[in-house]
Amino acid sequence: MVAKAGLDGHDRGAKVVARTLRDAGCEVIYTGLHQSPEEIVTTAIQEDADAIGLSILSGAHLTLFRRIMELLGDRKILVFGGGVIPDDDIKELSALGVAKIFTSGASTNEIADWVKEAVGHR
């Protein structure tokens, strides 16, 4: 599942990643813009998602990822993301349980390969 959390209205990257994953053979649900963490997690559970990919460019990544991780609790749904996220924040997100953060410059092939490998082990 690919999601855009919060008030961030920049969805080009999320759509590119969703199409890339689809073209790589993944079943993908794109939730659209302005989803709350609660809506994202509810959709992931209802759709039996293996992974949630968050695209966040608003600067609210720590708050949004933290809330999504809290809502997921001990559910075995992989969480990854991308956006403009400082290295120090990536370390904090990792400590929260976020599996991977792709920063600007990551190729779509890199993202698709990582997702297929990570979800393949689930």
Image (spheres, rainbow, N blue to C red):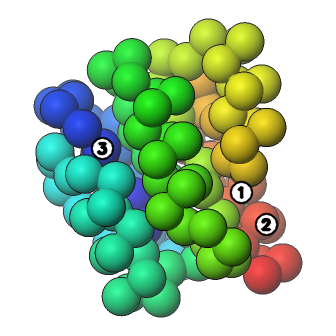
The residue that disc 2 covers is 117
Q: CA distance from mark 1 to mark 2?
A: 6 Å
Task: Judge from the rendering whether residue 7 lies leftward or rightward of residue 23; answer left or right.
Answer: left
Q: Nearer the viewer, residue 82 or 24?
A: 82
Q: Residue at x 38, y 87 (%)?
A: 47
Mark 1, secondary structure of its residue: helix
Residue 58's x, y, as percent?
31, 20
- Tag 1–tag 2 contact (CB < 8 Å): yes
Q: Toward which corner of the image does residue 24 lie, by quadrant?
A: bottom right
Mark 3, secondary structure of its residue: loop
The residue that disc 3 covers is 5
The residue that disc 1 covers is 113
Mark 2, secondary structure of its residue: helix
Does residue 5 show up? yes
Q: Toward which corner of the image does residue 43 lie, by quadrant?
A: bottom left
Residue 105's x, y, as percent?
58, 20
Give the residue type that dot 2 points to.
Glu
Of the two numbered discs 1 and 3 on the same chain, state the one appearing first in sequence: 3
